[in-house]
Amino acid sequence: WYGGPQQWLWVVAYPAMFGRGTILRAAATCLWDSIPNMLFFYIPTFYMWTGLVKGKSIQESYAQLKKEYLSTFTGMAAFWIPVQFLNFWLVPPHLQTYVVSSVNILNKSWLSWTSNDKRPVSLLDSLSDVKETLQVEDFVGS
């Protein structure tokens, strides 16, 4: 995504729509890139796909999305708006994808943590499940 359609938006479409080089233009580009993308595309897609990967039904994924939507959007906006503002203001267009890719590691770590922090499984629960599943006899010859 970042190397194809998103990069085209940053390098071609946004400069044509907003121009570049001033604080006001960087702010307009940043808000246009961040808010509609997060609200309508990124957050819903993230929750639906990761829910399905975790084995949740579409209804369960949608319920989690509804429950966590506002807090996720707030966190994403608090992260991406300053990053993208600086990116569109100070970074040459051909390097903007690298900036986003680099800081994405932090953002996706937070997003993964926040979407999983309410899961009821603890490390001790996981270990006891493994202990019940694996018996000593499985490893020692009879």
Image: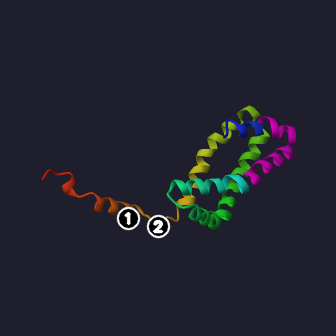
Report x, y in % for residue 113. Answer: 54, 57
Report x, y in % for residue 4. Answer: 69, 36
Give the camera-side residue of 52 and 71: 52
Asked whether the viewer can see residue 92, the reply is no
Location of residue 5 by image quarter: top right
Report x, y in % for residue 6. Answer: 72, 40
Q: Residue furthest left?
A: 142
Q: Residue furthest top?
A: 94
Disc 2 is placed on an element classified as: loop
Which dot marks residue 25? Answer: none
Disc 1 is placed on an element classified as: helix
Three-letter amino acid code of the residue under disc 2: Pro
On-image quarter of the N terminus: top right
What sort of colour scheme is used for the picture? rainbow
Dot 1 or dot 2, earlier in sequence: 2
Q: Contact (CB < 8 A) between labels 1 and 2?
A: yes
Give the camera-side residue of 26 and 139: 139
Does the magenta segment cover residue 30?
yes
Lateral position of residue 43 relative to residue 114, left or right: right
At 74% from the left and 50% from the top, the residue drawn is: 34
Up/down of 98 relative to 112, above or below? above
Three-letter amino acid code of the residue under disc 1: Asp
At 57% from the left and 59% from the top, the residue drawn is: 115
Does the magenta segment cover residue 15?
yes
Q: For marks 1 and 2, give the CA distance.
A: 9 Å
Report which residue position mark 1 lands on: 125
Q: Magenta region: which residues?
A: 11-37
At 74% from the left and 41% from the top, the residue drawn is: 87
Asked whether the viewer can see residue 94, the reply is yes
Q: Main secondary structure of the magenta part?
A: helix
Which dot marks residue 120? Answer: 2
Report x, y in % for residue 84. Answer: 74, 46
